[in-house]
Amino acid sequence: MNILVLCTGNSARSILLEALLRDLGAGRISVHSAGSQPVGRVHPGALALLAARGHDTEGFRSKSWDEFATDDAPEMDIVITVCGSAAAETCPLWPGTPLRGHWGVEDPAAAAPEVQDAAFTQAYAILRRRAEAFLAAPVEEMDRAALQAHLTQIGALA
């Protein structure tokens, strides 16, 4: 199962969820992240938080979703957007027939410097709960309708 986590800049939230799904999934799924308008670097706060929580941060980079739209790219089964609902941002749309889930989280990179660490911690905690809930089900065995319902239900978790 191939999962693509999308956000606008691919510098914080999508990187956090990519790391969480990869590590908690322990080989059950293949996960990637990208942005519709990548900023070109992973936010240092995201890398610091992931490292502090024991995640390997080697190889993360901010990249365009165009990398996953080529003929030789893996075919995505699921696309999850993580753009925040209250922020003035537009979530990217992915063409094709993968299942879609929206797990919106406010952008910790956009938080004021004095609360940015707390914002990263909060975003990580929300995304971890969602990743754990997703992986608690036998997602590899679910039919499309059940998997879509599962994705939608998880998007409502705080």
Image: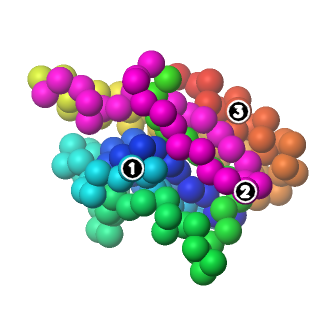
Outermost residue, left side: 114
Q: Residues within 10 Å of mark 3 (few under 14, many from 20)?
A: some
- Residue type at the position of mark 1: Gln
Q: Position of residue 43 (x, y in %)?
A: 24, 48
Outermost residue, bottom side: 72
**If you read the primary sequence from the N terminus, does the residue marked by circle 2 or circle 3 appear first?**
2
Q: CA distance from mark 1 to mark 2?
A: 19 Å
Tell me the tag on residue 96: 2
| Residue under the image location 77 percent in, 41 percent down | 148
Main SS, magenta region, reads loop
| Residue under the image location 61 percent in, 57 percent down | 3
Q: Position of residue 73 (x, y in %)?
A: 59, 74
- Residue type at the position of mark 3: Thr
Q: Position of residue 48 (x, y in %)?
A: 21, 49
Q: Position of residue 55 (x, y in %)?
A: 34, 57
Q: CA distance from mark 2 to mark 3?
A: 18 Å
> Is there any visible trace of residue 24 in the rendered image?
no
The answer to whether residue 36 is magenta is no
Q: Is residue 133 left or right of residue 13?
A: right
**If you read the primary sequence from the N terminus, does the residue marked by circle 1 or circle 2 appear first?**
1
Q: Secondary structure at mark 3?
A: helix
Which residue is nearer to you in this view: 45 or 109? 109
Q: Is residue 75 above or below residue 82?
A: below
Which residue is nearer to you in this view: 74 or 49? 74
Mark in the foreground, 2 or 3: 2
Q: Is residue 91 above or below residue 68?
A: above
Give the total number of marks visible in the rendering: 3
Q: Which residues are magenta?
A: 86-113
> Is there any visible trace of residue 72 in the rendered image?
yes
